[in-house]
């Protein structure tokens, strides 16, 4: 069995190849049971430690991702998420590889959001407002910039030092982009085409009244029932698609809270990512429509990404 570490993952991956690989997987036959999230007895209600197990399979490979989420780790100089993905051959059942899931999670999370944005954001979208300054933030910006003609990215967070670090990481990879530190998002939000949220905020980051017509909203930060990155009014006014109905309706406060408030009904959710990829549903009906993609993470995206890495490293 091949052991694939983070360095190998980062060396072979690019959004230009990963996004199509994930899209192809979602277009084909697959199996994906509900992921299992186990809260651990520690921390507070909104900052508890978590252990998760995510299985999935395709016609070529079976896999399971296991990860831990320790939200207070950064205060101890450690990463928030630690993960591994174990791959098996579908035809034989033989183990193929153990892939570093921590690095892979950043890549696949951003790639899935960009894949959805490729269907849901306006084709001429050129500005992005990024909420969040964690390890995931640069990946989110770079992924979106790979599917839309972005020229300006605004980075918003609570720490100027962290905002500047994200700015520098994006500029290092894409020096052609105008990346601005944005301490006051209110000054730019009405003029941006895409809003990407990758935060641990338990409460809405912005109000629906701030949004311009045609905005695409990408929510990846929360997978807790009582937390959300946008308000109910934003969800209600949007054309909503999710990565997995099963997982989102079990975990995501962004959707569950508006449902509990009777602000929306389940049929307000237009469908999920696989339907978007195979053309069963549309991501956008017109340029004035507000669109919203909610992702909590899927095992299929993890397995597809890990298998893509495995194939790249084992090309003849």
Image (tube, rainbow, N blue to C red):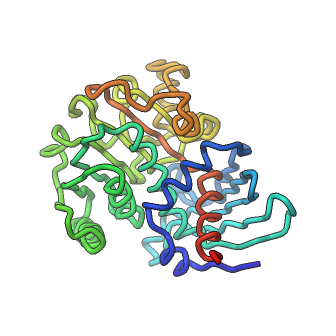
Q: Position of residue 247 (x, y in %)?
A: 62, 40
Q: Count all numbered tags in the image, as a single digit.
A: 0
- Quadrant where the N terminus sits is bottom right
Q: Position of residue 51 (x, y in %)?
A: 66, 59
Q: Is residue 225 visible?
A: no
Figure quadrant of the C terminus: bottom right
Q: Is residue 28 above or below residue 84?
A: above
- The one of 30 and 134 positioned closer to us in this rendering: 30
Q: Answer with left or right where residue 311 lies relative to residue 178.
A: right
Task: Find the residue positioned furthest to the right.
Answer: 92
Q: Is residue 16 toward the left or the right of residue 5 in the image?
A: left
Please say whether residue 59 is visible from this viewpoint: yes
Q: Residue at x 24, y 41 (%)?
A: 124
**Quadrant of res 134:** bottom left
Where does residue 312 sit, x and y in percent of width and height? 59, 72
**Which quadrant holds residue 218?**
top left
Nearer to the camera, 174 or 69: 174
Residue at position x 64%, y 36% in the image: 246
Is 262 located above or below residue 151 in the figure? above
In the image, taking residue 232 as reference, residue 178 lies left or right, namely left
Find the residue positioned furthest to the front.
Answer: 316
Residue that extends furthest to the left in the rendered view of this protein: 187
Residue drawn at (35%, 57%) of the image: 146
Q: Residue at x 25, y 65 (%)?
A: 163
Q: Nearer the viewer, residue 223 or 106?
A: 106
- Left or right side of 292 for 289: left
């Amino acid at each position: 069995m091949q052991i694939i570490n983070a360095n190998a993952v980062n060396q072979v991956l690019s959004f230009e190849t990963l996004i199509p690989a994930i899209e192809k997987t979602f277009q084909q036959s697959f199996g994906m049971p509900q992921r299992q999230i186990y809260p651990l007895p520690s921390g507070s209600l909104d900052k508890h430690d978590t252990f998760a197990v995510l299985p999935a399979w395709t016609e070529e490979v079976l896999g399971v991702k296991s990860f831990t989420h320790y939200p207070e780790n950064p205060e101890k100089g450690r990463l928030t998420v630690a993960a591994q993905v174990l791959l098996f051959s579908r035809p034989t059942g033989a183990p193929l590889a153990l892939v570093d899931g921590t690095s892979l999670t950043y890549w696949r999370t951003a790639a899935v959001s960009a894949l959805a944005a490729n269907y849901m954001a306006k084709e001429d979208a050129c500005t992005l407002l990024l909420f969040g300054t964690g390890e995931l933030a640069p990946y989110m910006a770079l992924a979106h910039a790979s599917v839309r003609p972005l020229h300006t990215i605004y980075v918003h967070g609570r720490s100027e030092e962290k905002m500047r670090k994200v700015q520098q990481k994006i500029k290092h990879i894409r020096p052609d982009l105008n990346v601005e530190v944005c301490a006051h998002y209110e000054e730019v939000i009405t003029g941006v085409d895409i809003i990407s949220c990758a935060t641990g905020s338990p409460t809405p980051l912005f109000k629906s009244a701030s949004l311009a017509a045609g905005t695409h909203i990408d929510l990846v930060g929360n997978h807790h029932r009582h937390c959300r990155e946008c308000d109910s009014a934003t969800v209600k006014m949007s054309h909503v698609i999710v990565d997995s109905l099963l997982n989102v309706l079990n975990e995501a406060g962004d959707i569950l809270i508006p449902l509990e408030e009777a602000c929306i009904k389940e049929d307000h959710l237009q469908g999920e990512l696989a339907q978007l990829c195979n053309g069963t549903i549309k991501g956008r009906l017109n340029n004035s429509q507000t669109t919203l993609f909610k992702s909590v993470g899927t095992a299929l995206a993890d397995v597809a990404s890990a298998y893509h890495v495995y194939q790249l490293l084992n090309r003849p």
